[in-house]
Amino acid sequence: MIGATALELRCVPADFAAAISAVEQMKREGVLIDYAIGGAMALVFWTEPVPTFDVDVFVLLPGTSSLIVSLDPIYRWAEANGYVADGEHIIIKNIPVQFIPSHNTLADEAIESAATLDHDGVPVRVIRPEYLIALYLEPSARTAKRLQRVAALQEESVIDASRLESILQRYNLKLP
């Protein structure tokens, strides 16, 4: 595996800001409409960090009204800008970045309502904890590991209870 190890990404590495800058450049150039950091890396901003080896970037892509979504424009952009693909990851400044296209309206909302937070002077769009919880509770994502993340977010993060309840009701999701 090229790039960072789980231990290196446990506490946001210096190259994270450079990777986010590359994602922002993709947005400016129209390769993607919008993005938000999700998965384990998002937890770093809301609760205790958990080991991870990559950064999950949820994206809204232009022209994705059909059921078939292609990440080809992202991979072409990466290659044109000197970044290497390694399986499903693009290695940006030594960090494996996985681009995850929005898969439903819940994910769309999570991206669109992301919080813009500061990381060493770099603005970073991060999925809010209420949406992380909802995404973890989707039937296709509801694993023991993700339910542990839900519990951690509920215990250690500032959750907007009314926002969470609204999201769970609208998407017919239940807390464990």
Image (spheres, rainbow, N blue to C red):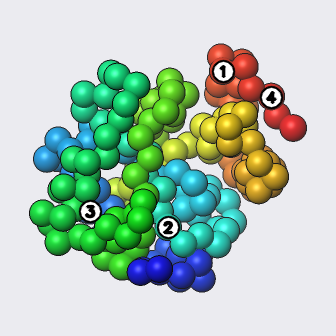
How dense is the environment of label 2, judged by Cα within 10 Å: few (below 14), some, or many (20 and up)? many
Question: Farthest right residue?
Answer: 176
Quadrant showing the C terminus:
top right
Q: Amino acid at mark 4?
A: Lys
Q: Position of residue 83 (x, y in %)?
A: 24, 70
User: Residue 106's quadrant in the figure?
Assistant: top right
Note whether residue 19 is visible.
no
Q: Amino acid at mark 3?
A: Ser
Looking at this view, is 82 or 119 the one in front? 82
Q: Residue at horizontal 26%, vertical 42%?
A: 32
Residue position marked by numbered label 4 in the rendering: 174
Against 93, residue 48 (above or below) is above
C-alpha separation, residue under disc 3 versus residue under disc 2: 16 Å
Looking at this view, is 22 or 68 the one in front? 68
How dense is the environment of label 3, judged by Cα within 10 Å: few (below 14), some, or many (20 and up)? some
Q: Residue at horizontal 80%, vertical 28%?
A: 174
Q: Residue at horizontal 52%, vertical 51%?
A: 38
Residue position marked by numbered label 2 in the rendering: 54
Relative horizontal placement of residue 59, taking residue 103 as reference (left or right): left
Among the two numbered marks 4 and 3 on one chain, the one whose residue lies closer to the N terminus: 3
Secondary element under disc 3, as helix, strand or loop, is helix
In front: label 1 or label 3: 1
Residue position marked by numbered label 1 in the rendering: 171
Q: Amino acid at mark 1?
A: Tyr
Among the two numbered marks 1 and 3 on one chain, the one whose residue lies closer to the N terminus: 3
